[in-house]
Image (cartoon, grey):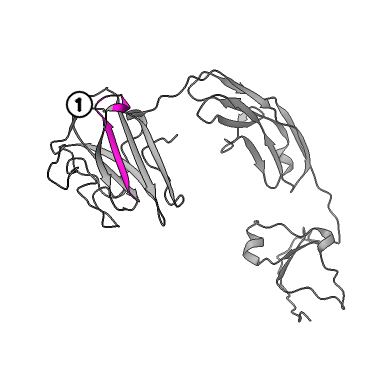
Amino acid sequence: MLPSFHTAVNFNDNYANRLSGYFTPPTSGNYVFFVSGDDDSDLFLSTDDNPANKRLIAQEVGWSNDMQWVTSGGNSSLSQKRSDQWSPNGGTTVPYAAGIALTAGTKYYIEGVHHEGGGGDDFSATFKLVADPDPVELDPTKFTNGVISYLTAPVTSGTIATQPVGITNYETQSFSLSVGVQTDSELSPIYQWRKGGVNIAGATNSSYKVASAVVGDSGSYDVTVKIPNSTISLTSSAVPVLVQPSPVLTGLLKYEYFPGSDRPTVEGGTVSPSSPGNIPHRTRAARLIRSKLEMVSRIITPTASAACLFRQLVATTSSS
């Protein structure tokens, strides 16, 4: 399902997709429709809500960049991209030159079919009344919110199949909570994780993850689940999360070894260090291998309050 007549840009290669549903005009009048796609695309509109009565009203015969309504980066036919200039026979007839008469509040079946070969890809459609100005490049599609709809099967079930499990952990370690939901809804459930009954901002997936826990993350967690297009609302079991203070080892530094890595990757947190058993032993006879990176960290406890100067000393050695 999509919330508008606009698909993902540069999604993949060598595929076709179709968007379909109902268009409910907000105003009675004569309408003009526009299509934009990379690559070739067809736009259909029915005379009513029956798909069997659909008619081809506009086409992308070449390719255009995303939401290029009246221009084309691929030198596509501009007249074929809009319904009031589209012709089924090379310009001999233009069946919708005066616009397509539609009645406000009436559902009309609409369908778009798009094919992508290679390179970039996009697909979108929009509309206007004949007297309105043409859309300009990158104007958002008007096929959104209350003017589009889709018939779906009734929702009859929604249950929590897998409850979250409580966790005991140490600070700086990661933890994750997850829930499993079963439903016959065609739409994805809507999740909201909570701590102590208060919504956690941005925690709206089936799992909730904390990359580096602090003691303050301790508490009781649960998740509410709403099944779209139904009145079903669920709440998981509340589970405890206990984050304990990590022991501090005085007189030592934490040493991590990242074979084949570099500074930006390590500092970005997108790579894990080698396990302790795979860290080379540092002796005068055993040199570290090429293409590696090390990180040393420590919590500093000053012996007195004062302004401090920190220096970094780097020694380089051959890898022989």
Give the quadrant of residue 50. Answer: top left
Q: Quadrant of residue 93?
A: top left
Q: Is residue 48 magenta?
A: yes
* Image height of 180 relative to 267, above or below: above
- Residue 270: say if magenta: no
Residue for point 35% across, 41% down: 113
The tally of labels here is 1
- Front residue of this view, candidates 214 and 305: 214
Label 1 neighbourhood size at 10 Å, few (<14), some (14-19), many (20+)?
A: few
- Give the residues in magenta: 40-52
Secondary structure, mark 1, is loop
> Which quarter of the rendered picture does the N terminus lie within?
top left
For image coordinates 26% across by 47% down, the residue present is 69
**Quadrant containing the C terminus in the rendered view:** bottom right
* Relative image position of residue 290 (x, y in whole percent): 73, 74
Image-quadrant location for residue 314:
bottom right
Going by the numbered disc 1, the residue's amino acid type is Ser
Instruction: Determine the residue positioned at 69% across, 40% down.
Output: 176
Relative to 318, is 44 on the left or the right? left
Tell me where residue 219 appears, x and y as whole percent.
Answer: 72, 33
Along the horizontal axis of the image, is 97 left or right of 59?
left
At x 61%, y 34%, the residue is: 206
- Percent of width and height locating residue 174: 72, 45
Q: On the picture, is 249 further left or further right than 52?
A: right
Q: Is residue 24 visible?
A: no
- Name above or below for residue 5 compared with residue 118: above
Please name the residue that numbered disc 1 is placed on.
Answer: 28
Seen from the viewer's position, the closer of residues 299 and 72 is 72
The picture places residue 251, in percent across and down from the top left corner, at 86, 61
The answer to whether residue 261 is visible is yes
Depth check, front residue: 192 or 77: 77
